[in-house]
Image: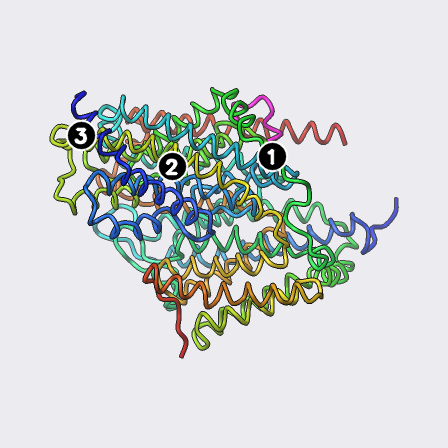
Amino acid sequence: MLDAFLLGADQIFSASTLLYMLIGSVAGIIAAAIPGFTVTMAIVLTLPLTFAMAPLQGIAVMLSVYVGGYSGGLISAALLGIPGTPSAVATTFDAFPMARKGEPGRALSLGVWASFFGTVISTMVLVVAAPPLAIFAVKLGPWEYFSLIVFALTIVASLVGHSLVRGLMAGAIGLAISTVGVDPIMGRPRFDFGVEMLEPGLPFLVVLIGIFAISQLASEVEDAPSVRSGKSLATQEIDFKTWEVMREVLMRPVNLVRSSIVGVLVGALPGAGGSIANLLAYDQARRASKTPEEFGKGSPEGVVASEAGNSATAGGGLIPLIALGIPGSAVDAILMASLMVHGISVGPRLIMDNADLVYGMFIAMVVASAMMLLVCVLSMRFFLRVAEIPKWLIVPTVIVCCVVGSFALNNRMSDLYLLGFIGLAGYALRALDYPLAPLVLGVILGPIAETNMRRALMTDADWTLFLTRPVSLIFLVAAIGSIGWAAHKYFRSRQNTEKSA
Amino acid sequence: MTEPTQESPSGRQEAGEIARLLSYVAIFAVSAGLGLEAAAIPTSRFEVLGAGAFPLMVYGLLCLVSLIAIVGSVRRIGVGAIARFGGEVLRWIRDRRLVIVIFACFGAYLISIPWLGFSIATFVFLLVAQLILAPRNPLSIGLAVVIALLFSFGLNWVFAEVFNVFLPRGT
């Protein structure tokens, strides 16, 4: 074991591998910082460049892009209020208000440190618990998955904003959007009305960019006199104290560890991913917080939870990949393809046949997170300049980035028309005070819920299995408890508001 | 008690509530229509639930919640509010004239991409949008031209040469 570990470390700590990993980190951070570009796209573009490298060197570079990408999404989430990647949706809830209150440096530093610790914690869990966790994760059937998604949907109750009814409506609209296009089991077309662009369904990324980015950018130019006077996104002087913030993150160990564990567990489930972990970790932090009313107004706890949660999925996703050869997400599938290109068969025997490679991957994860931290800390001042750019310049430019990101996804013009329409609808919903986060949650969870519900009933038509299978029952009971708790909190805060009024 | 006027915050709140009521009604109508469409999707012989079952549940939920929202909203809206609604809408549009202009530019940009190609359409969009939003001085205009060139022709070059991703070329 020690031999394999040292062999892996020797390959990772070679000068060329470290240099390539550094370039990968920078590329991942920049790609994810641009709205519309995802970690998956960055990894896909990196894959052909790794063919000429040694297997561990290639996978280490891709892991650097992966880890860097999970952190890069934070930059536009905090500074522009636009999630750079789907896994940074919840990051916008508190990092953006914090940046708007004149603390963009603190918002970014909190996110970067939380991402770093989240990745390190997930790697530690990966090393210790990969085999048992992987076996548990793959034993979950469609009943457990459906119940898990029902539990995840109860997050809507925490994201409703000013109105419970509008929050529920937004969540249901998200679920409705996910039903457009071919059905996920039989491939039968639904709700396309003969319109070609609706046939494949509404691409999630286009919906995300339209709902969050376009509507946010439009709302930035509402105040005509301030835009025309050259006002920038942040008006106060930008303060930047990264070491102080590191202590601030470490002063919240429970939140950090809990959010990272949520990220690892969600990452270990095939089909789930950073976007769900980001929201789930945020929701859990809010429920456990002594000051839940501060969430959504620039709470540091919210920033730490959301970023630790999404970054920890990187390690979590590797658990079923390394232990069983099952990729849990698109990114993990590309990592698996990279190994297979080099003639390495991925499966339960991977750790026995290629122990040096597996230990090298563990080391690469930690090195990649350290590199992400280094790159982010060194380039933070550069990124913070974004907040000083006048609105008249940044709004049209970011709109163009959104257009390029949406087009590059499938090379379809119709996606751009959808982007325009969804952006307009997103702005209308924002103006009418509908919360947008439940809508995005509905779009993410809708297809997983439908697929697993139908798959469960195809396997066995007995509905009671959702209640009689222990893990499924636990998730359903947790969902009921979660709704009850959220409703109790919501009505109590309304009563308090009415009394004080 | 003073009557809410068009300019008062309560007048604005009333107008906002009417706008929301209209949105609830629209959502209810669309959900009911799509719910009927979902019910018409035939079930498969291979499964208990068909392709229409999940959408039917979702649209049913949406109908129910929007109906609750409609009832709540109708109870909150005052008698004279509808008469003041038109004026408030005009004021809202006037306040957000830049947003409307930007959306109009964005729409024209998206429609023109297939004909003009990404580079030219983006250059024109960026230049026009920035000039609409920017303060009127030579530095802003010069900067707008440089940024428009960089993010249109420059971005197209980067994607084609570095990533092998070809953005629309136009006809």
- Pinpoint residue A184: horizontal percent, then vertical percent: 30, 51
How far apart marks 3 and 2 lie (CA) works out to 37 Å
A194 and A365: which is toward the camera: A365
Q: Nearer the viewer, mark 3 or mark 2?
A: 3
Foreground pick, A30 / A435: A30
CA–CA distance in space, label 2 to label 1: 28 Å
Circle 2 marks a residue in which chain? Answer: A
Q: Do the numbered discs 3 and 1 sit on residues whose CB atoms are within 8 Å? A: no
Location of residue A101 by image quarter? top right
Between A109 and A460, the residue placed more toward the observer is A109
Identify the residue at horizontal 23%, vertical 36% (top origin).
A321
Residue extent of the magenta highlight: A286-298
Which residue position is annotated with label 2?
A149
**Element assignment for label 1:** loop
Same chain letter for marks 3 and 1: yes
Q: Is residue A384 magenta?
A: no
Dot 1 crowding, Cα within 10 Å, few <14, some 14–19, many 20+: many
Q: Residues within 10 Å of mark 2 (few under 14, many from 20)?
A: many
- The residue at which mark 1 appears reads as A298
Tag 1: amino acid: Gly
Task: Using the rendered image, report if marks 3 and 2 lie on a common chain.
Answer: yes
